[in-house]
Image (cartoon, rainbow, N blue to C red):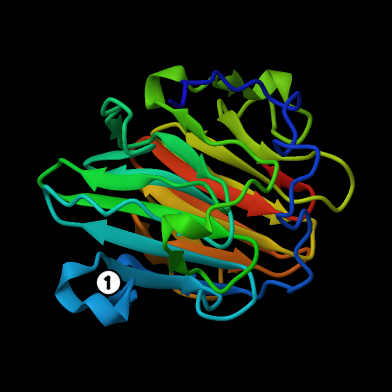
Amino acid sequence: MKTIITLVLATITTIGTFAQTPTTDNIKSINEVVTADTVEWGWLNPLRGDKSPAAGKLWGDRTKNEPAGFLVKFNKGFSSPPHIHNITYRGVVIKGLLHNDDEQAEKQWLPAGSYWQQPAGEAHITAADGEENMAFLDIQEGPYLVQPTDEAFDNGERPINVDKTNLVWLNAKDIEWVSEKSNVETAFLWGSHEKNQLRASLIKLPAGFKGKIKNLSPNFRAVVISGGISHQFSKKEDKKELNAPSYFGAEENATSIISAEKETVLYIRSNGEFEVK
């Protein structure tokens, strides 16, 4: 059975000495925005039709061998058969209650704001118990496939379930890339802070926040997990309202001008440094 693990910033690198999951992303991000109402939806497993969870594209193509970020919606009471995936994925719960574990494990319902990692090759089930259930999934390679458990294998990585209440949030004063006056908090999720290595964190913006996020890496992608922001790449363009589960990507050295009326949590995945001011 998986255990709940407390995360500490900068002390955890990708789990598993022999992990096969890529640690860099060579696809350069561009300035782009996908609002919650423009997400393109289909079926996660088209062969199962409406018996499959719905899947919404944010970036990349999960059916190809490339990094991708996408949304998954589950009906209340959904429970998958035991299965494996050919690649590792990471997930953050946006709505409802989700369970992801070994078939024999007692249900551990993860509420919105929780995080989990599902290693390639490990048998598991996924279930949902909220009235509305949605998660964001992040993959570093593809295609994303569902395969039978008799093809299970060990890729050296280990599963992780982190309830929202077990996340460790650090204040801006403890972080070099955040202005001390911003009151921004962060919770490290996965990856490495070594140069050019992929890493992902949750960033919590306080209600009333007004500022900028400058991307300093070739690849920067952000998903609104809760709350919402007004966003623009320059003051010359109109503001766009990005409510959960909207997404924006930024090219290297691009600056996003943002404001948040209410407390907002962003999932930020980058291939290097960024600054919050």
Q: Is residue 188 left or right of residue 192?
A: left
Q: Is residue 225 above or below residue 72?
A: above
Q: Identify the residue shown where x is 49% and y is 34%.
A: 204
| Mark 1 surroundings: few (<14), some (14-19) or many (≥20) residues within 10 A | few
Image position, residue 98 (x, y; %)? 28, 40
Q: Quadrant of residue 143?
A: bottom right
Q: Is residue 13 visible?
A: yes
Image position, residue 55 (x, y; %)? 33, 69
Query: In the image shown, does 221 or 125 lie closer to the viewer?
Result: 125
Image position, residue 65 (x, y; %)? 64, 77
Q: Is residue 103 above or below residue 63?
A: above
Query: In the image shown, does 74 or 78 lie closer to the viewer?
Result: 78
- For label 1, the SS is helix
Q: Is residue 211 left or right of residue 173?
A: left
Q: Quadrant of residue 163?
A: top left
Query: In the image shown, does 179 or 228 lie closer to the viewer?
Result: 228
Q: Quadrant of residue 34?
A: bottom left
Residue situated furthest front in the rendering: 150
The image quadrant where one finds the N terminus is: top left
The image quadrant where one finds the C terminus is: top right
Query: In the image shown, does 184 or 201 lie closer to the viewer?
Result: 201
- Residue matched to label 1: 37
Image position, residue 190 (x, y; %)? 65, 39
Q: Is residue 34 visible?
A: no
Please give the count of numbered marks on the rendered protein: 1
Q: Identify the residue shown where x is 26% and y is 54%.
A: 80
Amino acid type, label 1 = Asp
Q: Is residue 269 left or right of residue 136?
A: right
Q: Is residue 274 left or right of residue 131?
A: right
Q: Identify the residue shown where x is 47% and y is 21%.
A: 3
